[in-house]
Amino acid sequence: MLGLSELKQTKVYQEAKQEGKAEGKLEGKLEAIPFMLNLGATVEQIAEALGLDVELVGLVAAKAKPNQEQSGE
């Protein structure tokens, strides 16, 4: 049976760990979009700053807009 230290050395573990980090980074970037919009940044500026596709930022911005209107922003 593999111990924890041996498990961490496996290729499967390392790949899963990297995938989790990438997903976490993307999630953080997506969560930042509404805040950047509130600061007055454009979709294009946000996409460039975060290294994301303009269309993806636009989709997130469109979903964030109704939430902002409901909260009185």
Image (cartoon, rainbow, N blue to C red):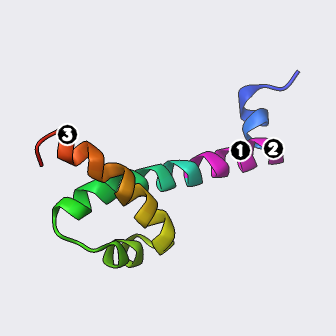
Q: Residues within 10 Å of mark 1 (few under 14, many from 20)?
A: few
Q: Is residue 49 visible?
A: yes
Magenta: main secondary structure: helix
- Give residue 25's mark: none
Q: Point out the residue furthest to the left here.
A: 72
Q: As displayed, is residue 9 above or below residue 7?
A: below
Q: Are marks 1 and 2 in contact (CB under 8 Å)?
A: yes
Q: Say which of 27 and 70 sits in front.
A: 70
Q: Which residue is mark 2?
A: 12
Tell whether 42 sits left or right of 38.
right
Q: CA distance from mark 1 to mark 2?
A: 6 Å
Q: Residues within 10 Å of mark 2 (few under 14, many from 20)?
A: few
Instruction: Give the residue at x 47% y 49%.
Output: 27
Instruction: Give the residue at x 50% y 55%.
Output: 26
Instruction: Give the residue at x 21% y 47%.
Output: 68
Q: Residues within 10 Å of mark 3 (few under 14, many from 20)?
A: few
Q: Nearer the viewer, mark 1 or mark 3?
A: 3
The region drawn magenta spans 11-21
Q: As displayed, is residue 34 above or below residue 48?
A: above
Q: Nearer the viewer, mark 3 or mark 2?
A: 3
Name the spot of residue 67 as percent of width and height, x first.
27, 43
Q: Which residue is mark 1?
A: 16
Tell whether 57 sits left or right of 10.
left
Tell me the kind of residue under disc 3.
Answer: Gln
Quadrant containing the N terminus is top right
Tell me the kind of residue under disc 1.
Answer: Ala
- Give residue 70's mark: 3
